[in-house]
Image (cartoon, rainbow, N blue to C red):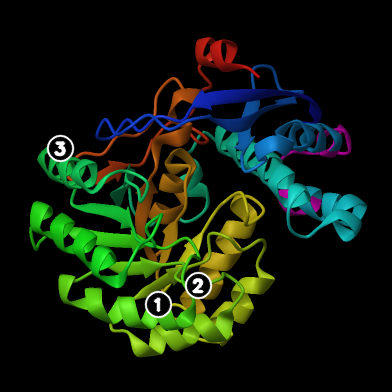
Amino acid sequence: MKITGCSTSIVLLPADEPLAGGPTIPGTRNFVTLELHTSQPGLVGIGLTFFGGPLTAALRHTVDLLCSMIIGEDPLRIEAIGDKLRSAAGASAGPGGMFTLALSAIDIALWDIKGKAFGVPVSTLVGGHRTRVPTYASGALMRNFTLEDGVRAAAMLVEQGWRQMKTQLALPGETTPDREEQRIRLIREAIGPDIDLMCDINQRWDVRQAISIGQRVEQYGLFWLEDVVAHDDYPGLAAVARALNTPIAAGEYVYGSVPFRHMLEARSVDIVMIDVLRAGGITGWLKIAGMAQAFNLPVVSHLLPEVHVHLISAIPNGLTVEYMPWSGALFQEVPFMKDGALEVPQKPGLGLEFDSRALARFRG
């Protein structure tokens, strides 16, 4: 079996909030989709990538260029293909940024092909630890939504059966520690004491703020505080982790495996968050997850629950899947939460098919 070609598209999905009917968000979320064709009739692998923003056209072009370098390769030799692309392009254009985002789309498609070729789900190929995995609602309690919207949405998510959810602090405008604490307090009151509540800062605090406000909100029993300071401030992250009882999660902004080594060696985090696109695809993701296990740390995911359900469920230190449904409209069918968890799709490969009508409707 050989790789014979690829097809890519830019898809501009509406930036809505479907979990709890939150306010409309201006703009679009811009994805690059990939279909990787093989010489075996009917066997096509699908992949995707994101984070291109205004450079999405360049990201698509990068995916096309990398695909052109692997025509004729055996798609089952995933490590060999990754090494070839890193040697040809990554040495000068990587390891972070556009090259890694493009490589990830190809790597995801290769794993989809491998699962389909062997007739098993990707989750089985890469570990098969569980067939059901916890998940949390993300995106419904964002900082730019009003406090009233956040409290309403939080209560609605509980009614829907969510047992975990994430909000955000580092509020916009003239925020104060009192306002920050008030938001967590009212959301906690709306959901009760038994729901796991995470909180994302998106790198908006300095170390002093993270410790000061983090100590104020510890009484509300957060499941974790996420990306409290700049992602590459490993000593700063470590200082916050030492000062707080609340677990610190980080990693979504990190490209490749080497920065995770620095993060782990500095004891900067209690929970390792890996984004499959910034990790270099499924192959890179698994290596980082293994590194986290060596440090006795759990792993959580960032975006793309349709892919991450396979990965978090496959490993013994997988904790929970972020259910951020930004990419769901790309596919005909996706896993949905039931009783606070996701069932791992049992179809071969990723168990996903692009929705041709949606791709045509939102094609950029």
In magenta, the rendered stretch is 66-80
Which is nearer the eye, 171 or 271? 171
Nearer the observer: mark 1 or 3; the answer is 1
Q: Residues within 10 Å of mark 3 (few under 14, many from 20)?
A: some
Instruction: State the CA–CA distance, disc 1 to disc 3.
Output: 32 Å
Q: Is residue 20 left or right of residue 323?
A: left
Q: Is residue 32 left or right of residue 71?
A: left
Which is nearer the eye, 105 or 151? 151
Nearer the observer: mark 2 or 3; the answer is 2
Which residue is depicted at the point 69% across and 17% down?
41
Secondary structure at numbered mark 3: helix
Q: Which of the labelled discs sits on residue 229, or is there none?
A: 2
> Which residue carries the number 3 mark?
160
Amino acid at the residue labelled 3? Gln
Q: Is residue 23 left or right of residue 59?
A: left
Amino acid at the residue labelled 2? Val
Q: Which of the labelled discs sits on residue 210, or is there none?
A: 1
